[in-house]
Amino acid sequence: MADHGNSPPDLVESDRLRASPSRRSFFAASAGLAGSLIAAPVAADSLADVPPREDGANLSGHSERSQYVKLARIPEAGPGKRNVDPSDAINSKAPLDKLFGGITPTDLHYERSHSGAPDLDPAKHRLLVHGMVGKPLVFNVEDLKAMPSVSRVVFIECTGNGWENWKKADENLTVQHTHGLVSTNEWTGVPLKFIVDLVGKEPDSHWMLAEGGDAAGVARSIPLTDEILSEAFVAYGQNGEPLRPAHGFPMRLVMPGFEGNLNIKWLRRLKFGDQPWMTSWETARYTQLQANGKATQFQLRMDTNSVITTPSGTMVIKPGYQRINGLAWSGHGRIAKVEISTDGAKNWRQAQLTQPALPKAQVRFQMDWTWEGKPTRIVSRSTDDRGNVQPDRKSFIAAMGTNALFHYNAQQTWSIDETGRVRNVLD
Ligand SMILES: Nc1nc2c(c(=O)[nH]1)N[C@H]1C(S)=C(S)[C@@H](COP(=O)(O)O)O[C@H]1N2
Ligand SMILES: [Mo]
C-alpha cells in the first residue's frame, strides 16, 4: 500500500495491528476502506489543474506565519471569564483544535502568570541555592549553560485545566476553552540532581522551596522524591531557543508530570529544608475543597487525560467520513492506549497513536469514523503505562465532589446534533 501514490498519507499502523499476523490482508482491506471513506479528491492529471508558480518575498531574519493562518491564544480572567481586558487576564489558552502533532508552537504555549510576565535582564538575574546545603551558591544563566544539560519533551498543565466543566457545561465552548491550559514543548536545562550535588544537599533535607522572581513571588515546597530528583531540571531553553519571557526567561523549573504551578518561572531561589514551608500557595491557593468540607493539600501529580480536538466544540460536521483526532497525556508516564466511543460511551474502539508516544508528553491519537447523520455523543478515554484509566465524569465527581476546582481529568464528551453541530456537554 505504501507505494501507491493515491493512498492517504495519514493512514498509520496502530501498535495492535503491527503485531497482527494478518497485517498484509489488513492493509489491503484498509486501503479500500480508506479510499471509500476519505473525502474524495478531484481526479486530474494536468498542471493546468494547479495554480501557476509565484514570486517569493525577500528572505528575512525570522519567518512569520502565512497571512492565511490565524492562530492565537485566548486570554481569560478565570473560569467563564472570557473577552476580558488584557490587564485582567490571568491565563491564556492554547488553540488545541488548530494544532498538529504533539509539540505546541512556542508562541502558542498556554500561559499562566499570577502577576504578568516580567522581562528580566539575564545579566542581572541570579539564582540563589541555599538552606540545608554544605555550600550555598548563586548562579547566573551563563553558569547554567556551562553545566551538563538535558533536553526533554514534556507537557506542562495548569491545575485549573478543565475547571470550566466542574459544575456545568457551557455548550458554546471550544476545546481551546475547555482544555487549553496544557501544552508540550522541548525544554533544555540543568538536571536538578547536578545542582543538588554541587551545593552538597544535606541527607536530611527532603524538601525544596522554589521561588519566582516575579512580583507575585510564587513559591512552592517540593518533596525531593527519587522521581523528582532524577527528572526535574532548571531550564533556560524552550523549543531550541532561550525561554520566552512569558515562560520564565531567563530560567525556570521544569517538573515533568507535576502541577503546572510547581514549574516556577523567573526562578530566583531554591532552598533546601527538612519540611515544607507551607507558603500561602500550598495552604490556600492550590488546595482542593472536598465534598466533606475538608481540604486536600499537595495534590501534585497531573493525572491521565485526553480530549478529542476534531471534531470538537462549536465545529459543524457533515454526514460521511470523519477522522477523529485528539491529544492524550499523563503525569504518571507514557500513554499506552486511547479508546474512542462514537455512541455515547457504550462501545469503544482503540485509536491509533502517533509515535513516538513520550512519557509525560502529549501524544496525538486518531481514528476513522463514518457519521450517519444521527445525533450522537463522542468521547475519548486514555490509559497510561501504569494502568491509570481516565475516569468517566460520574465516577470522577463521585470521588471528588463539586467543591473542588483543580485537577479535572474526567472524560470529555462532545454531543453532535442532527445538523452536525458539536457541543460541549457533561456526559
Ligand atoms: N514565578 C512564577 N512561576 C509560575 C507562575 C507564576 O505566576 N509565577 N505560574 C505557575 C502556574 S499556575 C502555571 S500553570 C505554570 C504555567 O507555565 P507557562 O506560563 O509557561 O505555561 O507556571 C507556574 N509558574
Ligand atoms: Mo496553573
Image (cartoon, grey):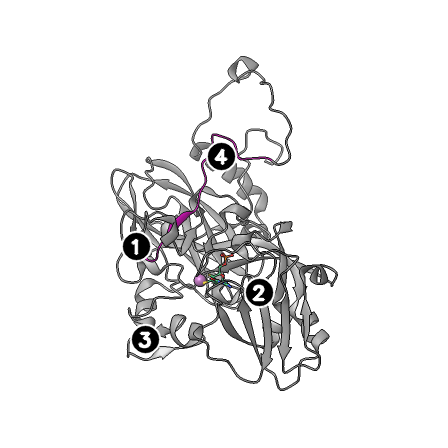
Question: Label 3 vs label 4: CA separation?
Answer: 52 Å
The residue indicated by pointer 4 is 32
Magenta stretch contains residue 68: yes
Farthest residue toward the bottom? Answer: 204
Residue 417 position by quadrant: top left
Give the mark, 3 or 2, whose residue is nearer the N terminus: 2
Instruction: Indicate the amino acid at tag 3.
Output: Gln
In contact (CB < 8 Å): disc 3 and disc 4 = no
Farthest residue toward the front? Answer: 124
Q: Magenta segment, which residues?
A: 63-79
Instruction: Indicate the amino acid at tag 4.
Output: Gly
Mark 4 C-beta to ligand 1 under 8 Å: no
Question: Label 2 vs label 1: CA separation?
Answer: 30 Å
Instruction: Indicate the amino acid at tag 1.
Output: Gly
Mark 2 C-beta to ligand 1 under 8 Å: yes
Q: Position of residue 82 (x, y in %)?
A: 32, 50
Determine whether the residue tagged by mark 1 lies in a helix, strand or loop. loop
Q: Residue at x 55, y 41 (%)?
A: 27
Q: Position of residue 215 (x, y in %)?
A: 48, 63
